[in-house]
Amino acid sequence: MKTIKTKTSTLNSLALDWAVATLQGFTVKLNPMGFSSGSQSGFWIWEDKANGKMLLIGDNYSPSTNWNDGGDILDIEGISVNFEAGIWTARTVNDIEADGKTLLVAAMRSYVTDKLGEYIELPDLLSVA
């Protein structure tokens, strides 16, 4: 699979959720059920074990939009947030800041930047996400 280098401060939607899933240590697979198109195609958190997680990234798992997926990360990582002039800013305990239109986007961008740096390699399929 081809990859592209992307600035973490600009990650959105599926690309941001994919980056967080990999940081959380989840096994991420592309189309593990063989669907190459349609609503079930895409990147999945896929644990090949009994009762393992099987979550479609961006749908069943979306820390950039869903508090059930992203909220605990703020607490565990000690991410603080501020809202000013219509922009959310999140800061990690290592003073890594990131902005976003929503609190969770800003927080997940700061988390990914803190852990992986200003640029990451991600699958090129996510470059349009």
Image (cartoon, rainbow, N blue to C red):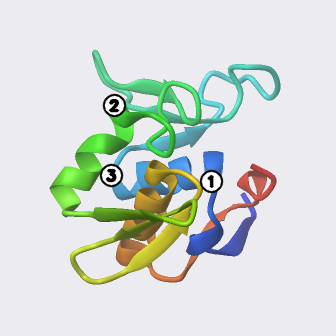
Which image quadrant is residue 48 in? top left
Tag 1: amino acid: Ala
Q: Secondary structure at mark 3?
A: loop
Q: Residue at x 66, y 32 (%)?
A: 31
Residue 24 is tagged as 3
Q: Nearer the viewer, mark 1 or mark 2?
A: 2
Q: Nearer the viewer, residue 37 or 11?
A: 11
Query: Which mark sits nearer the N-terminus, 1 or 2?
Result: 1
Residue 64: where, in percent of width, then height? 49, 46
Q: Quickly name the residue at label 1.
A: 15
Tag 3: amino acid: Gln
Looking at the image, residue 18 sits to the left or right of residue 129; the answer is left
**Neighbour class for label 1 at 10 Å: few (<14), some, many (≥20)?**
many
Q: Nearer the viewer, residue 47 or 124?
A: 124
Residue 21: where, in percent of width, then height? 43, 48
Query: Which mark sits nearer the N-terminus, 3 or 2?
Result: 3
Q: Quickly name the residue at label 2.
A: 68
